[in-house]
Amino acid sequence: MSLEHIAAVRRVLYLSGTRADFGLMRSTLQLVAADPALVLGVAVTGVHLSATHGHTVDEIHAAGLPVVAELPVDVLTRTPASMSAAVAHCLQGMAALLEKHRPDVLLLLGDRGEMLAGAIAALNQGVATVHIHGGERSGTVDEPMRHAISKLSSYHLVATEASRDRLVCMGEMPERIHVVGAPGLDGLVDLASGTREEALAALDMPSAQPFILVVFHPVVQQANFAYEQARALLDALNLQGCPVLWVEPNADAGALGVLQALDEGSLPTGSRRIPHLNRGLFAKAMRHAAVMMGNSSSGIIEAASFGTPVINIGDRQRLRERNVNTVDVPADAVALSMALQQALARERYPCENRYGDGQSSARIAELLARLPLTLSVLEKTNAY
């Protein structure tokens, strides 16, 4: 399918590279696709096209969304050099795609390399970029990537007022920044509906004990330590003994170290290790887990909507804005075991979330339909 021009209709292209960004954007993309003022296309790259990672492009098709291009890149080598090469290959693919289909808007989310590639191609080819989740901090390599995408983008749809303020400090024009909340919260509670027993049956987890949800990704600049960090987490989980639902890491450098630790180690009785969970099952897992551990942004942003205690490990999310349900712990087996014991002993937190109200999709779709797209939006200068 191609993005065909329809008079008075604005053509929006979304670039998706991981299960994570698509899960966060699914509700928004479906609303955009249903808007008569907009025509949506999705360009797919990264782990979506990898059988090893679940071939999650199938979930985009199943959601009824039009996939207009598939841009394969290497996601199996998982080294710093291969990550750089993947950005280059994605840039080549996006340059050709934009030249062929000429969307009015390129929609991007977050901080990954494929998003940077899309932003570079769009700016060079005169396509306005709208960036979601700009202005956030992490303190790792993801942060300069996120800020680079912001500097290449024409408009910013941010999750919090603090993110807006950071973009203003970076020289972005205040009138081009809109606080919409985190789109990943839209429909999240509804996805997790049903009883605990139904959820555990769907997740194939034992119902007699509390379980721990683990999503642990490598930190790119600490790739050489990913194995030891994962082993420390495994040791802490085995000291506690609760069943674990461990979702395998993304394709970044260091992921092979995490997988090696899992291959060589063991998980407590009743545990499962899986490469991928669809969005609905992941929401149920976050809702019903006794504790969530790891370093995924889902623990920072989404788990608070269920009041789930979160143990955030190491540096990957160390400067993100926190909800009250999150504690930060180094990748040390003793420290992690103590934090896990304390988290299991406490009651759940109030279901309050600083990242939004679950109504972001409508705001995003409305802005996509009306934001000015004159040539001047591509002529960026610092506001100071």
Image (tube, helix red, strand yellow):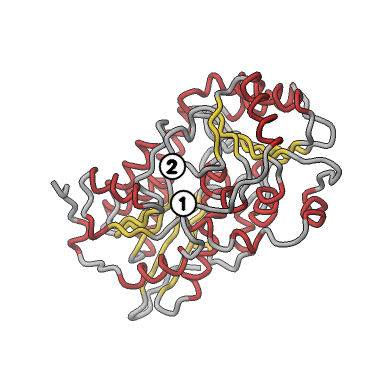
Q: Position of residue 242 (x, y in %)?
A: 78, 33
Which residue lies at the image location 82% right of the left edge and 47% below the top edge?
204
Decide which of 54, 149 is in the foreground and name it: 149
Which residue lies at the image location 37% right of the left edge and 39% below the top edge?
145
Q: Quick check: 224 left or right of 171? A: right
Q: Position of residue 157 (x, y in %)?
A: 36, 57
Q: Is residue 168 above or below residue 263?
A: below
In the picture, the disc for residue 287 is none
Decide which of 145, 326 is in the foreground and name it: 326
Q: Quick check: 226 left or right of 212? A: left
Decide which of 128, 3 is in the foreground and name it: 128
What kind of element bears circle 2?
loop
> Label 1 vs label 2: CA separation?
8 Å
Q: Amino acid at mark 2?
A: Glu
Q: Amino acid at mark 1?
A: Arg
Q: Is residue 336 above or below residue 149?
A: above
Decide which of 203, 43 is in the foreground and name it: 203
Q: Quadrant of residue 247?
A: top right
Q: Position of residue 217 (x, y in %)?
A: 57, 34
In the picture, the disc for residue 354 is 1
Q: Which residue is mark 2?
A: 321
Is the residue under label 2 in contact with that under label 1 (CB below 8 Å)?
Answer: yes
What kind of element bears circle 1?
loop
Q: Position of residue 159 (x, y in %)?
A: 41, 53
